[in-house]
Image (spheres, rainbow, N blue to C red):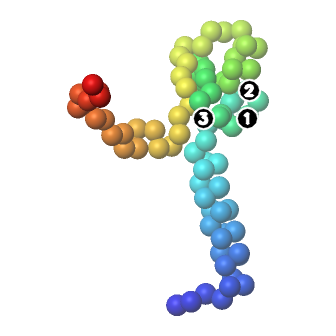
Amino acid sequence: MQSPIGDMPEFELALLRRSLGDIAGKVEHCHGCHRAMLIGERVYEYDNGELRCSLCCDRERRPATHSRTVHTAAHGHSIRLLDHRPVKRAA
């Protein structure tokens, strides 16, 4: 069934709002400034489960128990092709 052209922008907007809502619920936030962590950013975890960004970690008096890098949602689920054949060089 064909949709009228006038309905497409509303449909696209509804899809966009839905996807942004899904993403917002999965993003980690800093416990200090409540900012959403960026992909590639260093995150510091504390013994009580709190996460802090690099900026808030500097203001914290206690040491972090663990640090890690924020990855995308596809991390570990994407396909990586590995070619282990020897490289043929031109003579």
- Mark 2 nearby-residue class (10 Å; few <14, some 14–19, many ≥20): some
Local SS, label 1: loop
* Coordinates of residue 22 in the picture (x, y in percent): 59, 54
Between the residue at mark 1 and the residue at mark 3, the CA separation in whole angstroms equals 13 Å
Between the residue at mark 3 and the residue at mark 2, the CA separation in whole angstroms equals 18 Å
Q: Is residue 52 above or below residue 7?
A: above
Assess whether mark 2 and mark 3 are in contact (beta carbons under 8 angstroms): no
Horizontal arrangement in the rendering, residue 31 relative to residue 71 (left or right) = right
Local SS, label 2: loop
85 or 9, nearer to the observer? 85
Please give the name of the residue rendered at 30% of the width and 35% of the height, measured from the top-left corner. 82
88 or 69, nearer to the observer? 88
Tell which residue pokes out farthest to the left in this image.
Answer: 85
Q: Which residue is mark 1?
A: 35
The three-letter code of the residue at mark 3 reads Ile
Q: Nearer the viewer, mark 3 or mark 2?
A: 3
- Mark 3 nearby-residue class (10 Å; few <14, some 14–19, many ≥20): few
Residue 51 picture quarter: top right
Residue 21 picture quarter: bottom right
44 or 88, nearer to the observer? 88
Q: Is residue 39 visible?
A: yes
Q: Which residue is mark 2?
A: 32
Assess whether mark 3 and mark 1 are in contact (beta carbons under 8 angstroms): no
Q: Which residue is mark 3?
A: 39
Tell which residue pokes out farthest to the front in this image.
Answer: 91
* Coordinates of residue 18 in the picture (x, y in percent): 62, 62
* Coordinates of residue 28 in the picture (x, y in percent): 61, 37
Q: Nearer the viewer, mark 1 or mark 3?
A: 3
Between the residue at mark 2 and the residue at mark 1, the CA separation in whole angstroms equals 8 Å
Local SS, label 3: loop
The three-letter code of the residue at mark 1 reads Arg
Q: Is residue 51 visible?
A: no
